[in-house]
Amino acid sequence: MRLTLDSICKIGFGVEIGCLSPSLPEVPFAKAFDECNRLVIRRYIDIFWKIKRALNIGTEAQLRKNIQVMDSFLYKVIETRRADVDAAKAIHQSEVIKSSTASPNLNC
């Protein structure tokens, strides 16, 4: 699962989460992702999962906490991407302004 998740994050989000580093660190996003998969699959055998979700108890409370971990990671990625896009736009606009003011005036 580590290779798959690391590849998806690199290709889909442009973020290296480091699941494949030699020391195999525990990555909170990866752990939450794996746990969410496990808990969602358990819903097939747990007929009371909707009640647990409504009361926020048991496995559904764990699922909600893991979803919050994943959400916080993904919102940070989105924030970073938006900041990168805004910075690129600002640089592009300043370059356009510089090039338009630096061009010679050819009034004949």
Image (cartoon, grey):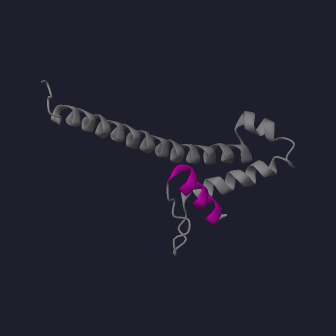
Say if 4 sits above or below 71 in the image: below
Q: Which residues are magenta?
A: 2-14
Residue that sits furthest to the left in the current view: 108
Q: Position of residue 3 (x, y in %)?
A: 62, 65
Residue that sits furthest to the front in the current view: 108
Q: Position of residue 4 (x, y in %)?
A: 65, 61
Residue that appears at 35% across and 37% down: 89
Say if 77 sits above or below 54 in the image: below
Instruction: Name the magenta segment's main secondary structure.
Output: helix
Residue that sits furthest to the top in the current view: 108
For residue 50, what is the image quadrant? Answer: top right
| In-image side of 100 versus 108 (left or right) | right
For residue 91, what is the image quadrant? Answer: top left
| In-image side of 97 versus 46 (left or right) | left
Which quadrant of the figure contains the N terminus?
bottom right
Q: How many marks?
A: 0
| In-image side of 91 versus 98 (left or right) | right
Residue that appears at 25% across and 36% down: 94
For residue 100, what is the image quadrant? Answer: top left
Residue that appears at 84% across and 41% down: 48
Which quadrant of the figure contains the C terminus?
top left
Q: Position of residue 82 (x, y in %)?
A: 43, 39
Residue that appears at 13% across and 24% down: 107
Pick whichever, 51 or 94, lies toward us: 94
Q: Position of residue 22 (x, y in %)?
A: 52, 75
Pick whichever, 52 or 33, lies toward us: 33
Pick whichever, 84 or 98, lies toward us: 98
Within the magenta stretch, is there residue 35?
Answer: no
